[in-house]
């Protein structure tokens, strides 16, 4: 059996345990006002520790004076000069039981220096990573520090730190810039902000670095350059062209024509039209563009004084004047303006005056035009009927430019002659015979062409026998005559022989009986 005293001790122990538990939970009898201290280093703060416990054996702040049981609050005046300071308010509830409450203290210090610097010397280069550092010197507490990076007024990066140290430290925040050409002249800066929570100062303590001015080097970018340009002869040089590129360092402009570097100040003339290349160069790179240059000038004739064209040719083939823009040409013949030039005709040969006009001036030129054309016969093909022994003349006459050469093509004979009379060429047949009945072809030729024409001679009453040579004809007649005479002589001889046998015969010719000499054909 336990004595009563022992039971009491056991009960007390139980109660003590109970009391301990009430102290560490919500039902802690102590209230701190303010419950948490956030203060700048060196600042002095006051904290009121009070209790709603009516009976207690004293209250005190750690290292502070103890108050008696009649008072329900105790004040703490604390100067925040110890980075690692800890404070606790305690209450002695019963003789053998104490209860305490920690004061949360945050001591902060804004940095002495915030500065941005480049990790490497020199300028940024477009597209090449460029690290920047922000050095924050002497700041506490670092875990509440937020470093913000700004490009211009825009936040580009934020960094926080996990270090748990309460004492001031130096930290560095890094930011890698990938420069764009637009960043040239932009200000980069960093800001150190202490985010101390709702119990901290109303304004977040912030220190900003002085700005770092970015100088970005970048290759030339052509800003303005016309694709084509029209200049006037003797008044234009490439240096007058408004062609510009943006680049850092400032690019130099070089002009190339037909692959060769040219002097941009050279005054251009008509021979210089064409494609030009503008090349902008700086230490980072090169940019090129092409410009189509047209140099305008007044009309100029470089034509001949004499032109040969062919009938039906287009007029445009004659004498094209130079000029830019293309001049309008007017033709004059015998002082009269020719309204519309169609195809050339054989009557268009002659002296002309040409006038060419464009907005830069006028030029005139006189020329002689010779319209060439193929020979044309004066007569058609024809057929002529002739009688034997007749004299016949037929001619061939053709016109053309240049004048054609006339030639007859036929089977020559003794009685056929050619005579030339001016541009006319006659054929004369004297004492026509059937041999002369043939086709006579006249050929007229000049450098434009060659034409032919035929004349057919037909012998009147022509039949098969007429084809026989007259000499043979006479031979046959003679042969028949000889045969006939021979027959007569033979008959006479036979008659005489009979008379000699049977008596005397008198040979008396029968008057009026003419024996014909020609047989019927
Ligand atoms: C401390 O707090 C108690 C209870 O809220 C209050 O009665 C007392 O006046 C306070 N003391 C000071 C100095 O404010
Ligand atoms: C303190 O002791 C008294 C009796 O001595 C008791 O009534 C009281 O509850 C105790 N208080 C606490 C908080 O334990
Ligand atoms: C930054 O500044 C420019 C003018 O300097 C302004 O137009 C722009 O709205 C600002 N942007 C921000 C986010 O403040
Ligand atoms: C800091 O802490 C966060 C989370 O607590 C973690 O994700 C991050 O990696 C830590 N950073 C460093 C540098 O330790
Ligand atoms: C680049 O920025 C610097 C500094 O602001 C300035 O002097 C320079 O003219 C700028 N260059 C160009 C090409 O904009
Ligand atoms: C054009 O200029 C070049 C020199 O650049 C010169 O040799 C040429 O004769 C000129 N031509 C004309 C038509 O003026
Ligand atoms: C044919 O011409 C010749 C020579 O000129 C002439 O002697 C002859 O009488 C002419 N014949 C006829 C039938 O006219
Ligand atoms: C050629 O013939 C034509 C007619 O056929 C005639 O008028 C002309 O006189 C002749 N010329 C010559 C040289 O015989
Ligand atoms: C003349 O005409 C004949 C037949 O038509 C032809 O074969 C011959 O080549 C021609 N001769 C010339 C020189 O034209
Ligand atoms: C005239 O004769 C020539 C030569 O025989 C021939 O080529 C041509 O076609 C003829 N012309 C006509 C209209 O019959």
Image: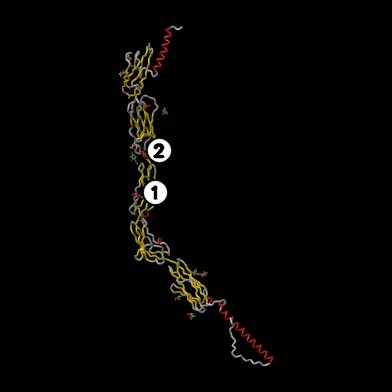
Which of 77/413 is in front? 77
Residue 113, placed above or below residue 91? below
Q: Residues within 10 Å of mark 2 (few under 14, many from 20)?
A: few
Residue 312 in view here = yes
Q: In the image, ligand 2 is in what quadrant? A: top left
Which of 110/129 is in front? 110
Residue 372 percent location from the top left of the image: 42, 66
Q: Which mark is residue 128?
A: 2
Residue 324, placed above or below residue 21? below
Q: As drawn, is 486 to the left or to the right of 35?
A: right
- The quarter of the picture where the C terminus appears is bottom right
Residue 520 percent location from the top left of the image: 59, 82
Residue 301 percent location from the top left of the image: 36, 60
The residue furthest right is: 501
> Which residue is under mark 1?
290
Classify residue 486 by image quadrant. bottom right
Q: Residues within 10 Å of mark 1 (few under 14, many from 20)?
A: some
């Amino acid at each position: 059996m336990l004595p009563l005293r022992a039971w009491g001790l056991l009960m007390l122990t139980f109660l003590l345990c109970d009391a301990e538990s009430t102290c560490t939970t919500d039902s802690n009898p102590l209230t701190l006002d303010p419950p948490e201290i956030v203060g700048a280093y060196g600042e002095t703060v006051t904290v009121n520790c009070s209790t709603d416990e009516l009976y207690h054996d004293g209250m005190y702040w750690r290292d502070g004076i103890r108050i008696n049981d009649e008072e329900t609050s105790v004040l703490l005046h604390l100067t925040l000069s110890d980075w690692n300071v800890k404070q606790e308010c305690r209450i002695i509830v019963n003789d053998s039981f104490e209860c305490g409450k920690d004061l949360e203290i945050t001591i902060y210090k804004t940095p002495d220096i915030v500065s941005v610097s480049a990790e490497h010397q020199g300028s940024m280069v477009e597209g090449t990573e460029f690290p920047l550092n922000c050095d924050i010197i002497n700041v506490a507490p670092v875990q509440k520090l937020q470093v913000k990076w700004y490009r211009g007024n825009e936040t580009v990066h934020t960094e926080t730190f996990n270090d748990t140290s309460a004492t001031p430290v130096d930290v560095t925040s890094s930011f890698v810039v990938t420069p764009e050409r637009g960043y040239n002249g932009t200000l980069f800066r960093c800001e150190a902000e202490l985010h101390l929570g709702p119990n901290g100062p109303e304004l977040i303590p912030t220190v900003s670095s002085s700005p770092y001015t970015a100088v970005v080097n970048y290759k030339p970018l052509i800003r303005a350059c016309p694709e084509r340009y029209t200049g006037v002869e003797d008044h234009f040089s490439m240096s007058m062209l408004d062609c510009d590129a943006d680049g850092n360092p400032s690019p130099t402009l070089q002009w190339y024509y037909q692959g060769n570097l040219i002097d941009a100040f050279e005054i251009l003339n008509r021979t210089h039209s064409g494609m030009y290349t503008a090349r902008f160069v700086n230490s980072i790179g090169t940019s090129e563009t092409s410009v189509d240059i047209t140099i305008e000038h007044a009309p100029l004739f470089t034509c001949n004084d004499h032109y040969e064209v062919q009938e039906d040719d287009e007029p445009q083939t004659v004498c094209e004047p130079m000029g830019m823009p293309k001049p309008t040409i007017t033709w004059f013949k015998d002082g009269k303006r020719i309204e519309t030039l169609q195809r050339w005709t054989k009557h268009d040969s002659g002296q002309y005056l040409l006038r060419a006009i464009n907005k830069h001036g006028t030029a005139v030129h006189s020329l002689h035009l010779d319209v060439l054309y193929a020979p044309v016969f004066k007569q058609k093909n024809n057929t002529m009927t002739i009688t034997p022994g007749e004299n016949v003349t037929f001619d061939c006459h053709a016109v053309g430019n240049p004048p054609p050469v006339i030639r007859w093509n036929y089977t020559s004979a003794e009685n056929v002659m050619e005579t030339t009379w001016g541009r006319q060429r006659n054929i004369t047949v004297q004492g026509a015979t059937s041999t002369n009945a043939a086709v006579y072809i006249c050929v007229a030729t000049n450098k434009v062409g060659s034409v032919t024409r035929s004349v057919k001679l037909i012998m009147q009453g022509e039949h098969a026998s007429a084809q026989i040579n007259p000499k043979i004809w006479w031979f046959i007649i003679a042969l028949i005559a000889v045969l006939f005479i021979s027959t007569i002589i033979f008959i006479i001889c036979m008659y005489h022989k009979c008379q000699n046998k049977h008596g005397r015969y008198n040979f008396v010719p029968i008057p009026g009986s003419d024996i014909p000499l020609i047989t019927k054909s």
